[in-house]
Image: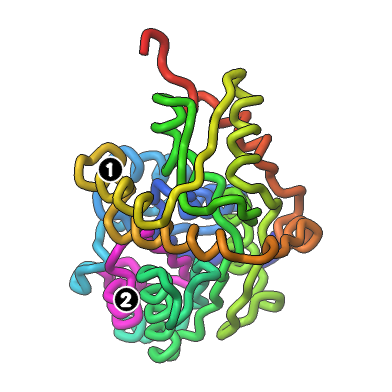
């Protein structure tokens, strides 16, 4: 990833910088600000997360992708736009509102979309189908988005979906079975996005790319790595997709993890079922990822060293 000190100063609108899943938006803000790029961030509330982004030198604009009336100030006079959306319902309306605001502003910013490999009209994941429809809307609006359909799961999925169970029972379960799964860190995915935002020659408008992950691990291997890092064995169990979906839906209903919702429960359990039936692991390309982000990608072991505390119960529990 190359930043030219002689390139003209640009302003990038970052949408999704407050996300709690992979956190790619906040990473994008940080990386752009490290190289003195102008950054404007759309947030739904001027809260502590917004304050942290403001401290990095980002301009904060309060608005809501699901309320078209609030978006004009966000898109005014920006040169590039980074668009990511939570693993939740609403992305098609959000994309339509964003496209409308940009068209109304009569500007032509470069648009980079953080997507997923399951973005397709016939995918068993409802969110995968919605992601595809949102990308179609942006294209139909003439915005020529550069779409990054990452062919890997985020390491952060393990924290979001399973850390609570591991803390309580030293075990976790899902519908991925014995499948070897490609993985990438949110940080590395964010650096891919930064590369796409800052290198238009390599990431031209109107292209859909499928960047591959950094490593491949089954969930049983993930359990062993967590056990080795924390010093206590962790057990992984394969369960049917319907059972895992119901368990995630229960978490969504009781509010145990605010980032888990009913649509996410259907999405990830369906994806797990698909992976469990694959004859072999999807490929990864560490060399290409290293070249794209300008450094070696993060391994899961390295990610664990930073997040091991999230898998260990507090003393006395």
Q: Secondary structure at mark 1?
A: helix
Coordinates of residue 120 in the picture (x, y in percent): 47, 79
Q: Which residues are magenta?
A: 71-100
Q: Residues within 10 Å of mark 1 (few under 14, many from 20)?
A: some
Residue 127 inside the magenta-drawn segment: no
Return the residue at label 1: 251
Residue at left offset 33%, top offset 66%: 74
Residue placed furthest toward the right:
287
Disc 2 or 1, which lies upstream in sequence? 2
Secondary structure, mark 2, is helix
Q: Residue 92: which disc?
A: 2
Is residue 203 or residue 152 the one in the foreground? 152
Foreground: disc 2 or disc 1: 1
- The N terminus lies in quadrant: bottom right
Q: Residue at x 44, y 39 (%)?
A: 162
Residue drawn where x is 37% and y is 86% of the image: 106
Q: Are marks 2 and 1 in contact (CB under 8 Å)?
A: no
Viewer-nearest residue: 185 or 176? 176
Q: Is residue 152 visible?
A: yes
Residue 119: assigned label: none
How many labels sit on residues?
2
Instruction: Identify which residue is drawn at 57% across, 64% down.
Output: 277
Instruction: Tell me residue 123's x, y (percent).
Output: 45, 76
Q: Is residue 41 above or below residue 71?
A: above
Q: Is residue 288 above or below residue 121?
A: above
CA distance separating discs 2 and 1? 25 Å
Query: In the figure, is residue 101 to the left or right of 110?
Result: left
Image position of 99 (left or right of 69): right
């Amino acid at each position: 990833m190359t930043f030219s000190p002689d390139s003209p100063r640009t302003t990038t609108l970052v949408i999704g910088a407050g996300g709690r899943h992979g956190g790619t938006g906040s990473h994008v803000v940080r990386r752009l600000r490290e190289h003195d790029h102008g950054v404007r961030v759309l947030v739904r509330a001027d809260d502590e997360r917004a304050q942290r982004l403001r401290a990095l030198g980002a301009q904060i604009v309060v608005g809501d992708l699901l309320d078209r009336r609030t978006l004009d100030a966000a898109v005014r006079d920006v040169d590039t736009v980074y668009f990511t959306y939570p693993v939740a319902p609403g992305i098609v309306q959000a994309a339509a509102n964003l496209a409308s605001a940009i068209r109304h502003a009569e500007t032509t910013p470069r648009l980079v979309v953080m997507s997923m490999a399951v973005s397709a009209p016939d995918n068993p994941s409802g969110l995968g189908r919605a992601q595809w429809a949102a990308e179609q809307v942006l294209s139909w609006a003439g915005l020529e988005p550069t779409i990054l359909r990452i062919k890997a799961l985020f390491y952060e999925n393990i924290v979001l979906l399973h850390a609570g169970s591991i803390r309580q029972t030293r075990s976790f379960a899902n519908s991925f079975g014995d499948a070897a799964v490609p993985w990438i860190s949110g940080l590395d995915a964010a650096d891919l996005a930064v590369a796409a935002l800052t290198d238009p020659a390599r990431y031209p408008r109107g292209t859909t790319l499928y960047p591959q992950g950094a490593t491949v691990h089954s969930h049983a291997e993930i359990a062993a790595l967590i056990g080795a890092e924390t010093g206590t064995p962790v057990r992984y169990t394969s369960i049917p997709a319907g059972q895992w979906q119901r368990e995630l839906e229960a978490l969504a209903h009781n509010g145990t993890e605010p980032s888990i919702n009913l649509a996410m429960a259907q999405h990830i359990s369906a994806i797990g079922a698909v992976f469990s039936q694959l004859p072999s692991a999807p490929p990864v390309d560490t060399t290409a990822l290293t070249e794209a982000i300008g450094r070696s990608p993060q391994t899961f072991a390295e990610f664990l060293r930073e997040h091991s505390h999230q898998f260990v119960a507090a003393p006395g529990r």
